[in-house]
Image (cartoon, rainbow, N blue to C red):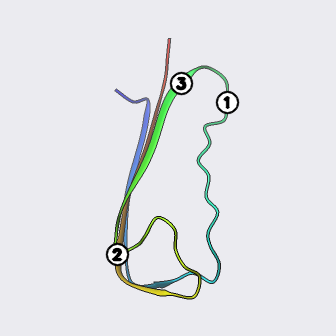
């Protein structure tokens, strides 16, 4: 069971990056926790190529964290 859980799904007919994105997930604060984040991508590679156009893209993202006792 999570203390906090977030899910989101986004879709784009066309998507192009001008540069390679830099992403990070952080869980700041105090206390020990167990955390996870994961994305499932359709028609979008793990590493995108700047300038290349991607079509019919879907990204489903999940983030969850819980404090441990």
On the image, which quarter does residue 3 sit in?
A: top left
The local secondary structure at tag 1 comes to loop
Percent position of residue 42, x then y: 32, 70
* C-alpha span from label 3 to label 1: 10 Å
Question: Residue 4 shows which numbered tag?
Answer: none
Label 1 packing within 10 angstroms: few (<14), some (14-19), many (20+): few
Percent position of residue 13, x then y: 36, 85
Q: Earlier in the sequence, mark 2 or mark 1?
A: 1
Q: Which residue is mark 1?
A: 29
Label 3 packing within 10 angstroms: few (<14), some (14-19), many (20+): few
**Residue at left 62%, top 42%?**
26
Q: Could you tell whether 60 is left or right of 34 in the image?
A: left
**Residue at left 46%, top 38%?**
36
Question: Residue 43 shows which numbered tag?
Answer: 2
Q: Earlier in the sequence, mark 3 or mark 2?
A: 3
* C-alpha span from label 2 to label 1: 35 Å
On the image, which quarter does residue 58 sit in?
A: bottom left
**Residue at left 53%, top 24%?**
33
Q: Which residue is mark 3?
A: 33
Q: Is residue 54 above or below residue 63?
A: below
Which image quarter holds the N terminus?
A: top left
Percent position of residue 47, x then y: 52, 68
């Amino acid at each position: 069971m999570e203390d906090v859980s977030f899910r989101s799904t986004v879709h784009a007919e066309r998507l192009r990056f001008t540069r390679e994105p830099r992403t990070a997930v952080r869980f700041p604060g105090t206390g020990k926790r167990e955390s996870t984040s994961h994305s499932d991508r359709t028609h979008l590679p793990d590493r995108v190529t700047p300038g290349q156009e991607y079509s019919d893209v879907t990204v489903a993202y999940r983030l969850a964290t819980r404090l441990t006792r």
